[in-house]
């Protein structure tokens, strides 16, 4: 396709504003799929994504669109991930495009992630085409939202397309706007090859599939290419695009987006942001902006049944084939036995992996307290260490300073919930940087320790605001803090899976909360069980579970035999998911539930 007839664009939106629905409509309208094939959302592939309504892996689709001017254009539509945990992937997909459709829900208006994404899009010099979606909703206020887009984002929305992705309104106008407003890509077909690696994933049939955007030169089947950041060379054995079904091509020219395979075994070798060049005639410089993604949240994953360790190893290895952004290494714990210390991009990422292991691989897991990475300066010129696991905390005497990662969070919330959100931020050691009002809502900017955000900040934010608050963050570096290791003792035995690094100032509240919740979560035994939180040798909080005879069926379920049976079965099953600590059984749920702060 000549450059003048190519349009590369992505859709940016806050979660649930209708990005995937719109993408599917555009595919349908350009004939990529039959109506029957459209019955399910196409771009959200995995079950978990569909259930949670989020897109994790970016996908791209090539559409052939016959415009009103009679010409046929090649439109490359990139679906970007919608969650802060995957910010780097968003950035790379945006870098592969010249423009973006900005989808805003006509009933909800501009939200935090709308802003975060649109700013990124502006940074990439995108032409932004606003689309006001869901105008079919009774609560839709398209004119107010149009004004909000102008006031809050500062872009012209006078020609915003009014649409309903659900009922198919405005789809033709959107396609015309893509052709007429978004610039065509630039590039030089005769220059040495430069292609950006936008995404990579493992496909059971094709092996590692690499999504690329060609900047200059031509990428051909049979070509030997060098990955400039990793320094490896590979023979390209397939070139193609998704319509959304796979179509093989002879080559990809400048401005084009498509995929290649090159007999690569491991996604870790195909890093997002890398530059592909021709081995025989290489480009002088790689493309700018390559960044290696680093896991920021770590936790231990242990099988409930120790016999499942090998199965866990296999399952984790298989997941890792498709996701180079999470890391794992073996870990042993006195109480939990053999397991893995895993690193994730954020809490959602952690939950997704954990859920997939449980669901797809049928594993019962214990997840230890998530932890951020601390930087510890040792005394006596002992150098510094990165702490991924509270269990490895050095002796306090050997520690000169501990630093923790901080983030800057932007929160967008209707006025009526602002008070409780500000309190939440304050309670989490937040430092207010800014507070402004836009379109009847408050925008608060806070600096917060990541440590205070990883557990349940997002959940709290949502529940305190009845779902209305939205949140986005980026890291702003390490800062020294008065941090200590808090241990939890159950029946005088330390449970290392529950130990965590906390700020001294909030330790007591945290400790008390943990003990109270564990008291609720650990069933009564035949003896009394003390639960304590301690720093060093000093107990800072304590609860006691009183003794009880565990005859649950005797009391309330007198007559009904089937209910009795069910209850016993349930108890038996529950028992399987318990972990023995000395003589105390702790249910699996307790490990995560105990970490949720009140
Ligand atoms: P995404 O998170 O931005 O990808 O949003 P989805 O496309 O998954 O849509 C979120 C929800 O909004 C789904 O339940 C859709 O059916 C619904 N939705 C999307 N577009 C429209 C629309 O134009 N009108 C209405 N009423 N609902 C829509
Ligand atoms: Mg989606």
Image (cartoon, rainbow, N blue to C red):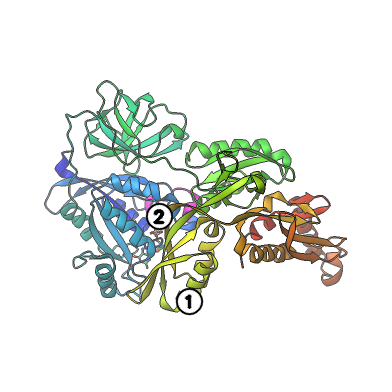
- Give the distance between the C-alpha atoms of the residues marked 2 and 1, in whole angstroms: 27 Å
Q: Which residue is mark 2?
A: 82
Determine if residue 365 is in view. Answer: no
Q: Quadrant of the C terminus?
A: bottom right
Front residue of 482 and 278? 482
The answer to which image quadrant residue 310 occupies is: top right
Q: Secondary structure at mark 2?
A: loop
- Against 299, residue 167 (above or below) is below
Residue 447 pos. (x, y %)? 45, 61
Is 285 left or right of 575, judged from the image as shown?
left
**Mark closer to the observer (2, 1):** 1
The quarter of the image that holds ligand 2 is bottom left
Neighbour tally class for label 1: few under 14, some 14-19, many 20 plus, Cα within 10 Å = few
Q: Which residues are magenta?
A: 37-50
Q: Residue at 42%, 58% (x, y): give it.
A: 473
Residue 263 pos. (x, y %)? 41, 26
Quick one: label 2 or label 1, which is nearer the N terminus?
Answer: 2
Magenta span has 48? yes
Front residue of 392 and 67? 392
Label 1 CB-ligand 1 distance < 8 A: no
């Amino acid at each position: 396709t000549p450059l003048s007839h190519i349009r590369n664009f992505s859709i940016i939106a806050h979660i649930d504003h209708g990005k995937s629905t719109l993408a599917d409509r555009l595919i349908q309208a350009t004939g990529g799929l039959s109506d029957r094939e459209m019955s399910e959302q196409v771009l959200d592939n995995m079950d978990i994504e569909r259930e949670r309504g989020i897109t994790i892996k970016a996908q791209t689709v090539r559409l052939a669109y016959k415009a009103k001017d009679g010409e046929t254009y090649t439109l490359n539509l990139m679906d970007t991930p919608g969650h802060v945990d995957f910010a780097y992937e968003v950035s790379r997909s945006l870098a592969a495009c010249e423009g973006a459709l900005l989808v805003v829900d006509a009933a909800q208006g501009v939200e935090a992630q709308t802003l975060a994404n649109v700013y990124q899009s502006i940074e990439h010099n995108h032409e932004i085409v606003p689309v006001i979606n869901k105008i079919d909703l009774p609560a839709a206020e398209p004119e107010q939202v149009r004004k909000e887009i102008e006031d809050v984002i500062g872009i012209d929305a006078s020609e915003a397309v009014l649409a309903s992705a659900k009922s198919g309104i405005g789809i033709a106008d959107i396609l015309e706007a893509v052709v007429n407003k978004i610039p065509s890509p630039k590039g030089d077909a005769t220059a040495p090859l430069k292609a950006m690696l936008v995404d990579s994933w493992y496909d059971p049939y094709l092996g590692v599939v690499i999504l690329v955007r060609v900047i200059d030169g031509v990428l051909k089947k049979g070509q030997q290419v060098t990955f400039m950041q990793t320094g490896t060379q590979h023979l390209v054995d397939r070139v193609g695009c998704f319509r959304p079904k796979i179509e093989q091509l002879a080559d990809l020219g400048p401005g084009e987006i498509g995929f290649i395979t090159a007999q690569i075994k491991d996604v870790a070798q195909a890093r997002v942001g890398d530059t592909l060049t021709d081995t025989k005639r290489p480009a002088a410089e790689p493309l700018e902006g390559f960044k290696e993604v680093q896991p920021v949240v770590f936790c231990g994953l242990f099988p409930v049944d120790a016999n499942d360790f090998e199965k866990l190893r296999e399952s984790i290895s298989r997941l890792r084939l498709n996701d180079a952004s999470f890391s794992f290494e073996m870990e042993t714990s006195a109480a939990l036995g053999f397991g893995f210390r895993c690193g994730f991009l954020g809490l959602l990422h952690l939950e997704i992996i954990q859920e997939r292991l449980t669901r797809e691989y049928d594993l019962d897991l214990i997840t230890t307290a998530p932890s951020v990475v601390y930087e510890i300066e040792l005394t006596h010129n002992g150098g510094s260490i990165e702490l991924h696991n509270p269990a490895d905390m050095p002796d306090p005497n050997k520690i000169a300073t501990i630093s923790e990662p901080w983030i800057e969070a932007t929160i967008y919330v209707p006025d009526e919930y602002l008070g409780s959100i500000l309190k939440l931020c304050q309670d989490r050691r937040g430092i207010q940087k800014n507070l402004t009002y836009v379109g009847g809502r408050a925008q608060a900017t806070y600096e917060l320790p990541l440590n205070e955000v990883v557990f349940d900040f997002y959940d709290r934010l949502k529940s305190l605001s009845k779902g209305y608050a939205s949140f986005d963050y980026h890291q702003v570096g390490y800062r020294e803090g008065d941090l200590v290791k808090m241990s939890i003792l159950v029946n005088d035995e330390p449970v290392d899976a529950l130990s965590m690094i906390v700020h001294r100032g909030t330790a007591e509240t945290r400790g008390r909360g943990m003990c109270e919740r564990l008291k609720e979560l650990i069933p009564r035994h035949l003896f009394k069980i003390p639960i304590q939180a301690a720093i060093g040798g000093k107990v800072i909080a304590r609860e006691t579970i009183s003794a009880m005879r565990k005859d649950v069926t005797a009391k309330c379920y007198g007559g009904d035999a089937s209910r009795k049976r069910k209850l016993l079965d349930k108890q038996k099953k529950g028992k399987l998911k318990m972990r023995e600590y000395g003589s105390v059984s702790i249910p699996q749920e307790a490990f995560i539930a105990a970490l949720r702060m009140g």
